[in-house]
Image: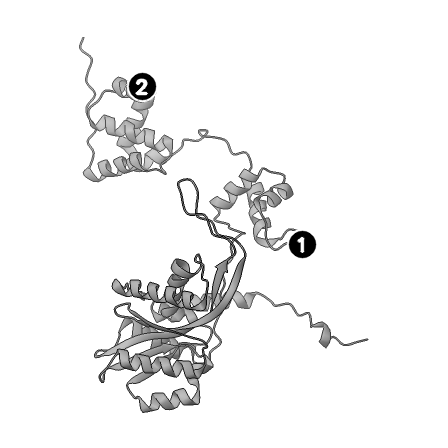
Amino acid sequence: MVPKSTPALQLKESDLQQLRQWVSAFGTPQQVALHSRTILAAAEGQSDNRIAQRLNVNRKTVTLWRGRFNEEGLDSLWEVAPGRGRKPTYGTEKIESIVKATLRTKPKGMTQWSCRLMAASQGVSKSTINNIWQSHNLKPHRVKTFKLSRDAKFLEKLTDVVGLYLNPPQQAMVLCVDEKSQIQALDRTQPGLPLKKGRCGTMTHDYKRNGTTTLFAALEVLQGRVIGQCYEGHRHQEFLRFLTRLDQEFPGDIHLHLVMDNYGTHKHPRVRSWLKRHSRFVCHFVPTSSSWLNLVERWFGELTRKRIRRDSFISVEDLERAIGEFMAAWNENPKPFVWTATVESIVEKLSRCRQTLEKIQPGCTLPRSRKKKK
């Protein structure tokens, strides 16, 4: 008798693409990849014996997954039958106690847990703690800075600035203006080693200070071009000189909308008098403690990471020349920073932050100087 040929599995094109993606993806579990290869081979019309020999599995296993796929579809390839798979070393109660200890306690005399400290405290291995923290997305070693603005006109200023970003006025230009003060000209005490295969570049941890400079910069929001000038200080005199530079950079009667912070230099009486005489300059102030709203701060970050932080400068003039070179290279192919957050999304996020802060009761211990003596 001639053995009956096994009919090929009929798959949708979308199912074929998904199976091939699972097989080629780096993060797919090996068990799921094996199931996917089995179904793909069955779709090609191969017999169960042929598939079993090719994938080095039992023929009954091939028959089982062919039947499961016919009945339940793609999702069945990810299911693990009860009693199968590696048994967990620790139960849910132990895992919950480790998570709770990570979130609600601190090691004696320290501010955060490490894998080794938590492992010693809980009587488990360091790798176990690492796996539990990864599965629960816990990162005790990391911290993010924040500051909620207490500006009484926060919503009004936020709406004004975000409106400029999302819907800039026609026949006008939006410039984000600020100063990066006290940029240090640091000279390393020894030459660093260059980058090579298998080794990153090096630099000494100590340095020599050769002075400081202050960079006044204006970021053109639409095109991403930057106009900047270095000065010795960041007083209102330097700011007036920079405003005059902007007046020359953008000749004509076009209105210039300046987004600035609340630094005293920007509101000096002489600056206000100058702005009154030059009516085409329109000022927009971000709320206090909200420098993240000024897009030029994002460009300052680019300058620090890509030019200043890892370089060495023998003088202030050398530092200012490096800043000028970076600015010129940036303006050859400027990339604007696109603002996408709406006022509603920002307000909603800040509202959640305030609700969280209200749940945290600050300590009521008085400073020593204010304690009453008995």
Check if mark 1's residue and mark 2's residue have beta carbons within 8 Å.
no
Image quadrant assignment for residue 20: top left
- The circle on residue 172 is none
Task: State whether residue 366 is above or below residue 59.
Answer: below
Quarter of the picture holding the N terminus: top left
Most extreme residue toward the left, as rendered? 2
Q: Where does the image place residue 18, in percent across and percent down from the top left?
A: 26, 39
Front-lying residue, 85 or 293: 293
Secondary element type, mark 2: helix
Residue with the mark numbered 1: 109
Estimate the spatial distance between the alpha carbons at disc 1 and disc 2, rounded to whole Å.
Answer: 60 Å
For disc 2, the neighbor class at 10 Å (few under 14, some 14 to 19, many from 20) is: some
Residue on which the image places disc 2: 59
Would you place residue 129 above or below residue 64 in this image? below
Where 125 falls versus 114 (above or below)? above
Which amino acid type is marked by label 1?
Gly
* Viewer-side residue, 79 vs 171: 171
State left or right for residue 16 relative to residue 183: left
Residue 123 x %, y %: 63, 39
The answer to which image quadrant residue 318 occupies is bottom left
